[in-house]
Image: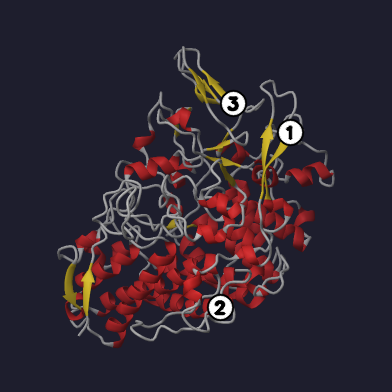
Amino acid sequence: MKNYKVKLLIILGLVFPFSCEDYLDVAPDAVIDEEVVFSTFNNAQGFVEEMYALVVSYEQQTHTFQDFLLGDDGFVDRPTKASGDIDAGRFNDVIRDNFCYLNNHYNADYGSTGTNSANVANTNAFNRQRPGLYDGSLRGIRKANIVIENVENRDLMVNATQAEKDVILGQAYFFRAFFHNEIMKFWGRYPYIDRVIIDDFRIPRPETYKEVALRANEDYIKAIQLLPVNWDLEPYGQLTQGENRGRLTKGTAYAFQGKNLLLAASPLMKGNNVSINTYDYDTELCDMAVEAFSGILQLADQGRYALASWENYDDVFWRSPAPGTWPGSTEFIFSATGGSRGQATRFMASGVNRAIHTTSAGYEVISPTHNFIHNNFGMANGLSIEDDLSGNFGPPTYDPTQPFENRDPRFYRWHIIDGQIIDPGAGDPNHVAAQLWFENSSQKGFHRSTGAENIKIVNNTGYMWTKFYPKVDGKYHTRWNPIIDQYVGVRMHMRLTDVYLMYAEALHASRGATAVPSSYGLSAEGAINLLRNRAGIPNVHPNIVGDNNKFMDELRRERSVELSYEAHRWVDIRRWGVAHLDKYRRKLALDFPQDRSNFTETLLVDRICEFPQHYWLPFPAEQTQIYEGFPQNPGW
């Protein structure tokens, strides 16, 4: 008989109020045997809910919560942070970074030595109650295997109904696949651990990413079969009626099944670190992904999910419909649980200079790069800036001397640009306008109020981003208009817009832009136009639709805009096999004087990125030296 030390990882009620204490009514750190843990549904669900607490919140996991955009989309003016290490090619430093969501090995006491502090005893305000992604995923895999062994193989839940056993197993199968996927996104092919490992840990790395993804796919299929569509409608969900939104469902499993397959089909994974062609996908896996995404889109058509309207789009990111509820709106599919008010507000304000939103010292901020904005946020006519300037689609509308004019509505919705009024004031002496111009290192953007204050605002790139930053009645949150505590920003692991984008990508890669599969009556072109039309952007130009490679470029650009600043970018540019190209390596600022008489692109960082070395994080050297059969990633 095995004993389990049950360490209750309390899920704080900021985002999802459910807690494992609702189920497993034992003291923290209690040691109980497996027959007690799995004797009833309540006890078993208490054990399962610890896996929810191991899902890493990318945007709130790190030290200051302002270094979670690791691609070409953000610039942090502190090269010692994780994004700076990635820019410099120092990937071994990334996996040792105590303040990175990939690891989070920060000590239990701030500034002192200690152990990994992923437990409720840790009171350090800078470190959160979960391990990092790698360690947490391994813990989650082990917990999932414990559940499967005891519920399915040993049938210990003798006092539970079949529906209760099913949902316990469904969650375990989902999490076993999900936590493998979390590791695979950053480290690549990884052994699929499908048993509780005690002594025999010598599991060789598989030869390809695909074979691991197919193992995960089997678990997602089982999860789909076992999970409910809606917890609130099930007898076992009555205990937590109204608090079940964050729990796993069929829709969640369909979405992640499709994502697992699409990532495995992507050019980087198909090339298996030997070769890479950005338009070459595994079409068999793409077809399987389309089938999976069709499952959740059918649920959307039945009313389970829906795309948010343009008018209500802020509900997805930060605006809650009522006190005590969450953002996400009808697009919500899955997110990490818990957090604190301080974590959420730091994340929500991470794209806005501190001098605007707080009186605290320091200027740490994620500045959106000019290259990311220029290459992806196009024009109001629906064209990229490059296509608009080409003249192949009509007279150009982009004027390099007025780069902020005639742009995609999403450019204005999710950014603060120079001259924009942040707080209209109405006679208020603290009237605030964004001044993001650059003249020299001592005059790099100032806020000048009509009062006595003259506040220096360091700006690194010429823009600020505000996707999760509250704006009510025409006024953003500022230190003079403190409204941020009334809202909770959430970055989701999965939302419905992402599903449409991945569905379109998989379908186009396999069958083309206009093909309609038998599983769901929507083409890739139609899926992309749904999202563009929501923002008031015209359909994709027919000449672009007719060119397979160009339509894939346009589809990727649409993904970059819609999911901007949601921490998908670094995974995307790697799996597409483009991260080593100049367009994605070079981080740029847009410099201009206060009178906007000229605009100059300035190089901030030329990222070190070589294929295949900088496409995968290295494993700690000691892990690859334990036994033969676990080789290091290429180049390390």
Q: Are marks 1 and 2 in contact (CB under 8 Å)?
A: no
Query: What residue do we see at 65% from left, 74% from top?
Result: 270
The residue lying furthest to the front in this view is 113
Quadrant of the image containing the N terminus: bottom left
Q: Secondary structure at mark 3?
A: loop
- Left or right, residue 423 beside residue 388: left
Quadrant of the image containing the C terminus: bottom right
State the residue position of label 2.
631
In the rendered image, residue 324, in percent from the top left (x then y), is placed at 29, 44
State the residue position of label 3.
445
Q: Is residue 601 above or below residue 94?
A: above
State the residue position of label 1.
600
Q: Amino acid at mark 1?
A: Thr
Asked where in the image residue 635 lies, by quadrant, the reply is bottom right
In the rendered image, residue 439, in percent from the top left (x then y), is placed at 67, 25
The residue lying furthest to the right in this view is 391
Q: CA distance from mark 3 to mark 2?
A: 49 Å
Q: Counting residues from the N terminus, which is met first, the one under dot 1 or under dot 2?
A: 1
Q: Amino acid at mark 3?
A: Gly
Q: Is residue 393 above or below residue 284?
A: above
Q: CA distance from mark 1 to mark 2?
A: 46 Å
Q: Counting residues from the N terminus, which is met first, the one under dot 3 or under dot 1?
A: 3
Q: CA distance from mark 3 to mark 1?
A: 15 Å
Query: What residue do we see at 70% from left, 64% from top?
Result: 514
Query: What residue do we see at 77% from left, 45% from top?
Result: 386
Q: Nearer the viewer, residue 461 or 505?
A: 461
Q: Residues within 10 Å of mark 2 (few under 14, many from 20)?
A: some
Q: Nearer the viewer, residue 241 or 165?
A: 165
Query: What residue do we see at 20% from left, 75% from top?
Result: 37
